[in-house]
Amino acid sequence: MQPNLFDDADEPAAPGDNRTPYQRFRDFHADNPGVYIALREMARSLKAKGLPRYGIKGIFETLRYTMAAETGRPFKLNNNMTAFYARLLMDRCPDLKGFFETRQSDADA
């Protein structure tokens, strides 16, 4: 059985893991490109329906639900990644610039 793309994604940093939150995000993102693609498509879908703004956490929860409903297994996605994904999406996708409200966070470091 192939491992789920998101198995162990919600696990806290292991003892001795000295990576910064950004480094953990960068590594997760590199290992799981499907998360970015799914979030991007969901955000674009909402924007196309006329929503000028939406919360990244709402999209995270929808992605968790959708994947769990499709696979019948819990879908793990660490909430610590939301600020990083919101900024990445708005940076890489001009059509999503300003779609998410951001506040000061580790993602700004």
Image (spheres, rainbow, N blue to C red):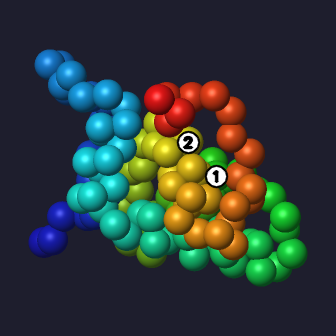
Residue drawn at x 57%, y 50% is: 87
Looking at the rendering, which quadrant does residue 15 occupy? top left
* Pointer 1 local density, CA inside 10 Å: few below 14, some 14–19, many at least 20: many
Residue 8 lies, in percent from the top left, at 27, 46
As rendered, which of 1 and 104 lies closer to the eye?
104
Residue drawn at x 26%, y 64% is: 4
Indicate the secondary structure of the residue bearing disc 1.
helix
Up the image or down, 37 lies above or below 6; here it is: below
Q: Amino acid at mark 1?
A: Ile
Residue drawn at x 65%, y 69% is: 94
Indicate the secondary structure of the residue bearing disc 2.
helix
Number of labels in the image equals 2
Looking at the rendering, which quadrant does residue 104 occupy? top right
Query: Which comes before the other along the chain, label 2 or label 1?
Result: 1
Residue 66 lies, in percent from the top left, at 53, 69
Residue drawn at x 55%, y 42% is: 83
Quadrant housing the N terminus: bottom left
* Residue at which label 2 appears: 83
For the question of whether residue 102 can be seen, the reply is yes
Up the image or down, 89 lies above or below 10; here it is: below
Mark 2 touches mark 1? (CB < 8 Å): yes
Q: Which mark is residue 56?
A: 1
Up the image or down, 106 lies above or below 47; here it is: above
Question: Going by the image, does 46 lie left or right of 68?
Answer: right
Q: CA distance from mark 2 to mark 1?
A: 8 Å
Question: Going by the image, does 54 lie left or right of 83?
Answer: right
Q: Residue furthest top?
A: 16
* Pointer 2 local density, CA inside 10 Å: few below 14, some 14–19, many at least 20: many
Looking at the rendering, which quadrant does residue 32 occupy? bottom left
